[in-house]
Amino acid sequence: MNETINIDNTVIDEKARKKAFRKTVGYMGWGLLLYILIEEAVVTIMTYIGLNNCSTDWRSMSDEEYSAFFDDFFELGPGGMISCVSVLIGIIFLFLYFRKKISIKEIFSSHKKMLPASFGMILCVFLGIQWITEPIFQSMENAFNQIGFSIETSMDDASSGALTLTMLAYSAIAAPLVEELIYRGFVLSTLKKYGKLYAIVISALLFGIMHGNLPQAVYAFIVGLLLGYVAVEYSIRWTILLHVINNSLADLLYYLGQNLSDEVNTVIFYAIFGISCLIGVFIIIKKRRNILKYIKENSFAPSTFFRTFTLVGLMLFIIMNLYTAFSMIEKI
């Protein structure tokens, strides 16, 4: 009799946990989806207003002419300001959306003390990932070429940099700050109750998918794992700093690259990312037992992982961004 009651209670508890999971993570998924829709709506409206105030007769252009014109108009014109405004409005919405779920204090809470040596090692691993992903991108391009397609446009888009001060403000400051608040803030804080590693992996995966660019998604996922670990074990303050440093360095190198020869650019790339990669690999090998121990101690059930992707809001968020990513693939 008692055994039957205990089994029934276990079943009830399991159902309650699944229901709570779906409610909590599902709420987060709808928040991400609404953020994307709001951001896109703001960009679309502001861009349309900008185009209508433009003296160029863009309506009479062919598709190819308009595409080239729009890229220059956005990148060299109001694109930076529009992007900054869109993410600002979006993040204000998320603060309001999660106000009863997650506090600002919780997002910015500190855990371990970050020592200068630890930050230096993490930064080297972070920058070294750029070096590792380059051959991955090329392998992806070769694989798509075999079936008659190319992701070269995606690769070019992923490696482009800021050309105006407002775009620099967006890519080097606004984007890293907002992305960290979303994925290492709201998302990670929501998911941590189901396990550290689960929160790190899912937040990194969503962070990668959010970019809507296949090569960039791979890079962002790998980087997201590192940033997730730093946020969980140290503080989101450090992930913001790491993200700002990375994006600022990328924009600086992109700007310098416009005025330097290919040979000099190659030397700079090898010097910064190549050396960082070597140091990063050395650190990972040296810390491999600690890394494996951390993974083992914080492992999660595969069912929890797969259950995440049965939630409607989250799936719509993923589908929207994957559609953007695959729409950039071109037929050769």
Image (cartoon, helix red, strand yellow):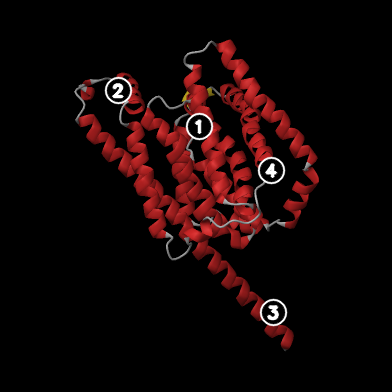
Residue at mark 2 to residue at mark 1: CA–CA distance: 30 Å
**Could you say which disc has been placed on residue 7 in the image?**
3
Q: Quadrant of residue 131?
A: top right
Q: CA distance from mark 2 to mark 3?
A: 66 Å
What is the tally of numbered marks visible in this picture? 4
| Badge 3 density bin: few <14, some 14–19, many ≥20, Cα 10 Å | few
Which callout, 2 or 3, points at the residue further toward the start of the chain? 3
Q: Name the residue located 64 percent from the left edge and 21 percent from the top edge.
A: 270
The amino acid pointed to by label 2 is Tyr
Q: Nearer the viewer, mark 2 or mark 1?
A: 1
Q: CA distance from mark 1 to mark 4?
A: 21 Å
- Please say whether residue 152 is visible from this viewpoint: no
Q: Residue flagged by tag 4: what amino acid is it?
A: Ser
Q: Which residue is mark 2?
A: 66
Question: Which element type, helix, strand or loop, lies under badge 1?
Answer: helix
Q: Which residue is mark 1?
A: 248
Q: Tell us which disc is closer to us: 4 or 2.
A: 4
Residue at which label 4 appears: 118
Cα separation between marks 1 and 3: 57 Å
| Among the two numbered marks 2 and 1 on one chain, the one whose residue lies closer to the N terminus | 2
Residue 233 screen position, x and y as percent: 65, 53
Task: Locate residue 71, reporting x and y percent.
Answer: 35, 25
Viewed as shown, does residue 175 lie left or right of 109? left
Q: Say if residue 32 shows up in the picture.
A: yes
Q: Are marks 1 and 3 in contact (CB under 8 Å)?
A: no
Instruction: Using a 10 Å C-alpha cutoff, classify the residue at mark 2 as few (fewer than 14 neighbours), some (14 to 19) or many (20 or more).
Output: some
Lower position in the chain sequence, tag 4 or tag 3 = 3
Most extreme residue toward the bottom is 1
Amino acid identity at mark 3: Ile
Of 330 and 153, the residue lying toward us: 153
- Cα distance, mark 4 to mark 2? 49 Å
Q: Earlier in the sequence, mark 1 or mark 3?
A: 3
